[in-house]
Image: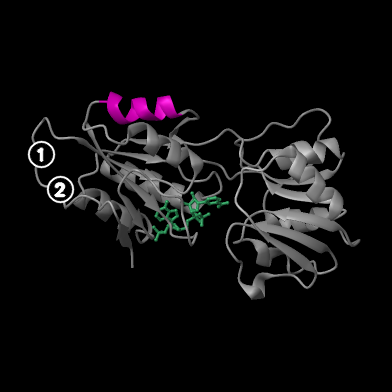
């Protein structure tokens, strides 16, 4: 069941006067959503609620009202948008949160609610990078090959089970929260840590663990880019999972453009 965290989300929407604040929903769980929340918090022209999936046990605090938990698919989101009288939606979820983004597109299109995607640009490969680009975790497993490797696995907690079919490798796994025991491969070491990381710390981590392959999602952004720089410095092969296709919603990469969308368009 979705739960509401303090400060509380607003009551059900009633017919509004012109001077009432714009009601916005920010689909979050990312540094982009946190930056946007910090940028618009306290502005009386806006009543914005941040929504989190509830995956991490200790999410960073938000200055905006926050609700936690799934909506119940696109239909559930439609109900929420209608009941809360939401005027516009910002999808600031992670580039790999494909299901939530698809639901946002479907619900907003059905209701005629303006939608903007606020996300980070993916990383670009530099000439000296040794990337093996794959579409998904199954592709990443295939790219690791048959021979045993020492793999730094940084794809997050949820996809770890996809690597159980390649137990010949040693995995150095880094996640924010503890993964389920059954998803962990036979030979692994686990680091529970949240970014940002420095290139120096990534270099010494990879050197000490004698890593010879890095597996990463191409999530973009600065907070986790140090591992890519470190792999470049060590001339390591990087198995890079490319982000899913984001559909046809308008996309921006900076907080000012997202803020302008919240305040700038007519209702
Ligand atoms: P997902 O596969 O696209 O979403 C699965 C379901 O979780 C959605 O259908 C929705 O449930 C619920 N959900 C996801 N994001 C939500 C949100 N912001 N508010 C309310 N419900 C949400 O997403 P995911 O990959 O599991 O990611 C979950 C959350 O973690 C996202 O908010 C994302 O921003 C964040 N995150 C993801 C990654 C990643 O690598 N995937 C990395 C960092 C942070 P209903 O259908 O019931 O509405």
State the residue at coordinates (88%, 62%).
146
- Image location (x, y in percent) of residue 226: 71, 39
Residue at 73%, 69% (x, y): give it.
Answer: 164
Asked if residue 65 can be seen in this view, the reply is yes
As drawn, 110 above or below 250: below
Q: Position of residue 149 (x, y in %)?
A: 87, 58
Magenta segment, principal secondary structure? Answer: helix
Q: Secondary structure at mark 2?
A: loop
| Residue under pointer 2 | 13
For the image, the number of numbered tags is 2
> In this picture, which residue range is highlighted in magenta?
255-265
Residue 153, x across and y down, in percent: 73, 55
Number of the label disc, if any, that sits on residue 73: none
**Mark 1 → mark 2, Cα distance in angstroms:** 8 Å
Contact check, label 1 and label 2, Cβ < 8 Å: yes
Magenta-span inclusion, residue 96: no
Does residue 211 appear anywhere in the picture? no
Residue at which label 1 appears: 16
At x 15%, y 48%, the residue is: 13
Answer few, some or many: residues within 10 Å of disc 2's Cα (few below 14, many 20 plus, some between 14 and 19). Answer: few
> Alpha-carbon neighbours of circle 1 within 10 Å: few (<14), some, or many (≥20)?
few
Q: Furthest residue to the right?
A: 147
Rendered-image quadrant of the C terminus: top left
């Amino acid at each position: 069941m979705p739960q509401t965290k303090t400060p509380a989300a607003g009551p059900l929407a009633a017919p509004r006067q012109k001077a009432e604040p714009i009601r916005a929903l920010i689909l979050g769980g990312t540094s982009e959503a946190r930056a946007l929340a910090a940028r618009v918090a306290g502005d009386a022209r806006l009543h914005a609620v941040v929504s989190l999936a509830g995956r991490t046990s200790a999410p960073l605090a938000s200055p905006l009202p926050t609700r936690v938990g799934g909506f119940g698919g696109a239909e559930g989101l439609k109900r929420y948008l209608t009941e809360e009288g939401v005027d516009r939606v910002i999808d600031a979820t992670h580039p790999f949160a494909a299901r939530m983004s698809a639901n946002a597109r479907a619900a907003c299109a059905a209701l005629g609610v303006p939608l903007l995607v606020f996300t980070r640009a993916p990383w670009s490969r530099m000439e000296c990078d040794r990337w093996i680009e794959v579409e998904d975790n199954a592709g990443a497993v295939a790219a690791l090959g048959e021979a045993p490797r020492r793999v730094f696995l940084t794809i997050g907690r949820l996809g770890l089970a996809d690597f159980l079919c390649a137990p010949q490798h040693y995995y150095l796994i880094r996640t924010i929260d503890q993964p389920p025991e059954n998803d962990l491969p036979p030979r692994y070491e686990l680091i529970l840590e949240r970014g940002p990381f420095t290139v120096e710390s990534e270099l010494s981590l990879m050197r000490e663990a004698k890593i010879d392959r890095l597996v990463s999602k191409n999530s973009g952004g600065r907070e986790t880019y140090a591992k890519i720089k470190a792999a470049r410095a060590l001339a390591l092969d990087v198995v890079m999972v490319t982000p899913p296709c984001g559909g046809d919603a308008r996309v921006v990469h900076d907080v000012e453009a997202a803020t302008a969308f919240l305040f700038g368009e007519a209702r």
